[in-house]
Amino acid sequence: MHVGLEESVGPMHELGAYFAARAKGGVGLIVTGGISPNIAGWTKPFASTLNNKIEVMKHRGVTDPVHEEGGKIVMQILHAGRYAYHPLAVSASKLKSPISPFAPRALSSRGVRATIKDFAKCARRAQKAGYDGVEIMGSEGYLINQFIVSKTNKRTDEWGGVYKNRIRFPLEIIRAVREKVGPDFIIIYRLSMIDLVKDGSTWEEVVELAKRVEEAGATIINTGIGWHEARVPTIATMVPRGGFAWVTKRLMGEVSIPLITSNRINMPETAEAVLADCAADMISMARPFLADPEWVIKAEMGREAEINTCIACNQACLDHVFENKKATCLVNPFACREKELEIRPAKKAKRIAVVGAGPAGLAFSSTAAERGHQVTLFEKSEELGGQFNLAKQIPGKEEFKETIRYFSRRLELGNVELKLGVEADASMLLDFDEVVISTGIVPRELSFPGYNHKKVSSYIDVIRGKKIGKKVVIIGAGGIGFDVAEFLLKDANTSEKEFLDLWGIDTQLENRGGLKDPISQPPHRELFLCQRRPGKLGRNLGKTTGWIHRAELKREKVEMLSECEYIKVDDQGLHLFVGGEKRVIDADDIVICAGQIPLNEFVNDDYHVIGGAGNASKLDAKLAIEQGTLLGLSI
Ligand code: NAP
Ligand code: SF4
């Protein structure tokens, strides 16, 4: 996956260090993020391109370190087509995509031939740069996919019309690449096995393409699930683990080259289950290797408890990339900073007290302990994890429990002394060389009349199991307001079948694009989600996942109210102005999700304060773990 290190001006040392760490960690075969074969194929202006000798030299900065660690690496060639975020975009036809503001130019027949040559030349340059192979990106709705599917290919020449003509483009690319690179170079073809867009390929067409791809000279077929413009979650955290392996499984036996499966495989037991089920020959993962470069070694050695599991949040990886920032990982701030951050033994081992075992305290304690400090961690509740213990209760966020498990194991390995159920006070902190306060936050309480009415609850009480009625108003529409809405809408976690039904995924693969009419149960509750500011609710949710939360609430008919002014709560319910108009919502319960304030009763300039205890306004788990880790590295 693209991580934002590809656009390096000089030698790609940072990208090399990132991949080398994964090769060292036992990864069998690495595939880079997409590199364009020409300028028109850029995903964004000045995206990484391999079309000249200087670029070949730059890529040595990637291949050499990987090979030094005994790894193998192939370079993905990606032509964005109409997904390009620049005015030079081209496609099969002049049809703008819903996710880019730039209408593409339709390639002429000559342009198509030139593009095929560019793919082949790019592959040859990749070979010269030391790569072990290339992956041809034929899925996710990029240029090749745009040729294959009739909805984006309206051509009337030999590259359009019937299916045989539409797949001519990828097949000619594979043939041209094979001719340029010889027989011993890996060619992976990433094939869109289920487009998840209207008028996408049929299953019969997918099988036909796979067979022709093999004949054309591909070594391996990789699975692509869904176009980027698809309105179906394919990798977000609510997608069940291994939730799309069944698609690859349908193709097993149709071709004789190996098939790779992908999407939401994040722990060894899931990967093992997929292989045992003969759903694929190989497993591919992207984000799990951001979260833990040593995933493979740990799995191999039976050290699964030490794996830092990708929780599929997208918050520090894909959201960053889509905001033109370098990717990293919410649970692993070292990702993509391999040359910058390193755990080095402390010059002087210190006795350190940490107060609060939420994400910030856990990240600090484990990092400091690994550097040789003697850490004592005080936590007033009986469990580690802080706010993550609430997050893991939200349907679709169960993965957060893995982060708690991971940090608990690191504390154990670092011999951190745990004082659970102990509310620290200043007198207990006197004998330490350093004190770190990571006591977190408390929910902001509101003060309108009736704020203490029995109908009013904090989100913490609700998530912890307080009984809530059938008609509910949620005050505050930030990340937690949306989470609580989903919590109140679903009594239980969604099963794989329910997920597929809810999002209209056709597991029989009888319909074009693998879509069917969604099937959902009537909502459990009538919900109202309110904010004071004007505009769309959920605007600040993650770039790559916010649309999913908004779609879920829309499907469940949650009434979204902006420009709210809360007047009072009484036995009738909530009285408020909505856009200046008075309204009474006869709710059974009103749940407050109005942000947080720091919880820090310790006042001492000598203490280090991290996480929400320091600043609750801009804080989330990503920042908390990063702050804890950075302090742990520097103390
Ligand atoms: P938040 O995102 O800051 O949202 C707070 C909400 O409360 C806003 O809708 C705000 O909207 C409202 N509010 C603030 N002060 C209020 C007041 N005095 N009276 C009434 N309403 C008030 O905070 P959060 O939802 O508690 O989340 C905390 C942190 O966790 C955030 O950084 C968030 O990004 C993160 N988080 C992220 C996710 C995720 O999925 N990415 C999920 C959960 C939490 P108005 O001011 O317009 O009313
Ligand atoms: Fe996984 Fe979230 Fe890390 Fe991305 S940021 S790799 S989704 S844990």
Image (cartoon, helix red, strand yellow):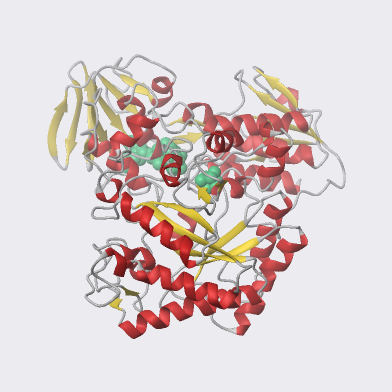
Q: Is residue 591 above or below residue 219?
A: above
Is 82 on the left-hand or right-hand side of 319?
Answer: left
The residue at 60%/79% (across/down) is 55
Instruction: Point out the image quarter for the C terminus.
Output: top right
Q: Quadrant of residue 529?
A: top left
The residue at 57%/53% (across/down) is 328
Is residue 67 among what the camera can see? yes
Asked whether 610 or 160 is in front, the reply is: 160
Looking at the rendered structure, the number of numbered marks drawn on it comes to: 0
Q: Is residue 157 above or below residue 594?
A: below
The residue at 74%/36% (across/down) is 301
- The x, y position of residue 568, in whole percent, is 23, 26
Asked whether 187 or 496 is in front, the reply is: 187
Asked whether 17 or 506 is in front, the reply is: 506
Q: Is residue 589 above or below residue 2?
A: above
Is residue 446 among what the camera can see? no
- The x, y position of residue 557, in whole percent, is 20, 34
- The x, y position of residue 459, in whole percent, is 39, 26
- The x, y position of residue 344, in whole percent, is 80, 49
